[in-house]
Amino acid sequence: MKISGINDSVNEQLFFFTFGISIKDSCEKKKQKCVEKAYLDFCRTIDYKNVNRLQKNNYKNQTYKLILDLLEWYPQIDGKNYTLFDDWHCYAIEKMIDKPKEYQEMFGELQITVGQAQKWLNMSIKYMRMMGLLNKDIKSEYIHIPIDNYIIDAARREGKISELFDVEGLGIMPTFSEKWSKIADYKKYLEYQQAIRQKLQNRNCNPIEWESEAWMAEATVRTEETLKGNKER
């Protein structure tokens, strides 16, 4: 990936500071770094029972490989087939949730939830797509959006989310009652993704494209509200 209008030196710095990689690195290394960065986007929600550095590194490395293998394995299909992607995604999440069972001493009864696994997998896909590294058979219109507090609030809003971005909320309430990191029911998770997909089909927009703008717009709104609150104190 190269950002147009920016010289090679700045592009190189952006790659290094964001993903810890060089533009000249292999595709395999870039993909690995995408998955590693995606882990950082949700790992604060994991409550490890016993933190053993070696076991933790082994767990992360094995799951990195699992995610990369799952993405590489994605079946080849022709035309639009959302159901096949959803079935593959469900299978991938199940495999990710099973992995901590091999580290019972470290996790105890607290395993990885659907909410945590979707964040890891969906952010990995998002980063790879941004960098042009995603399996070509995974079409943009299939992709699930990474669910977090910002996206839940953005999707709930009606009308324009922020004056700084030309993106509107969807007026959609979540189909789950718990925090995103505690989602345990994949069916409820998928219902939410499908509701967003259906809403955006009417706007001729892919969910992942909406998510990129909506997340930034929601972040801007939150920053403005924080600054306003500080001034009023």
Image (cartoon, rainbow, N blue to C red):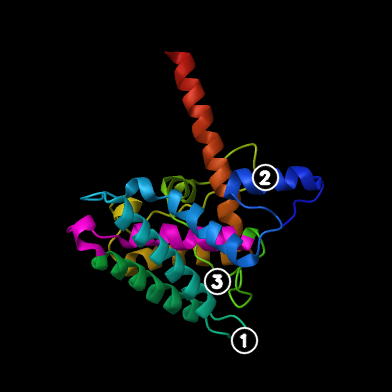
Residue at (48% x, 74% y) in the render: 69
Q: Is residue 162 magenta?
A: no
| Residue 87 image position (x, y, % from top left) | 42, 79
**What residue would you read off at disc 2?**
14
Judged from this view, the residue extending furthest toward the front is 54
Q: Is mark 3 on a helix, strand or loop?
A: loop
Residue contact at pointers 3 and 2, CB within 8 angstroms? no
Label 2 crowd (10 A; few <14 / some 14-19 / many >=20): some
| Residue 44 image position (x, y, % from top left) | 36, 45
Q: Which mark is residue 142?
A: 3
**What residue would you read off at disc 1?**
78
Q: Is mark 2 on a helix, strand or loop?
A: helix
Question: Which three-letter amino acid code belongs to the residue tagged 3?
Answer: Tyr
Question: Which three-letter amino acid code belongs to the residue tagged 2?
Answer: Leu
Residue 139 left/right relative to 50: right
- CA distance separating discs 3 and 2: 28 Å
Residue at (35% x, 73% y) in the render: 95
The foreground one among 27 and 44 is: 27
Residue 4 left/right relative to 183: right
| Residue 36 image position (x, y, % from top left) | 48, 56
Which picture quadrant has residue 116? bottom left
The magenta span reads 103-129
Quadrant location, the N terminus: bottom right
Q: In this view, does 55 lie above or below 165?
A: below
| Residue 210 image position (x, y, % from top left) | 59, 55
- CA distance separating discs 1 and 3: 13 Å
The foreground one among 123 and 60 is: 60
Q: Residue 154 carries which label?
A: none
**Which comes sooner in the sequence, label 1 or label 2?**
2
Number of the front mark, 1 or 2: 2
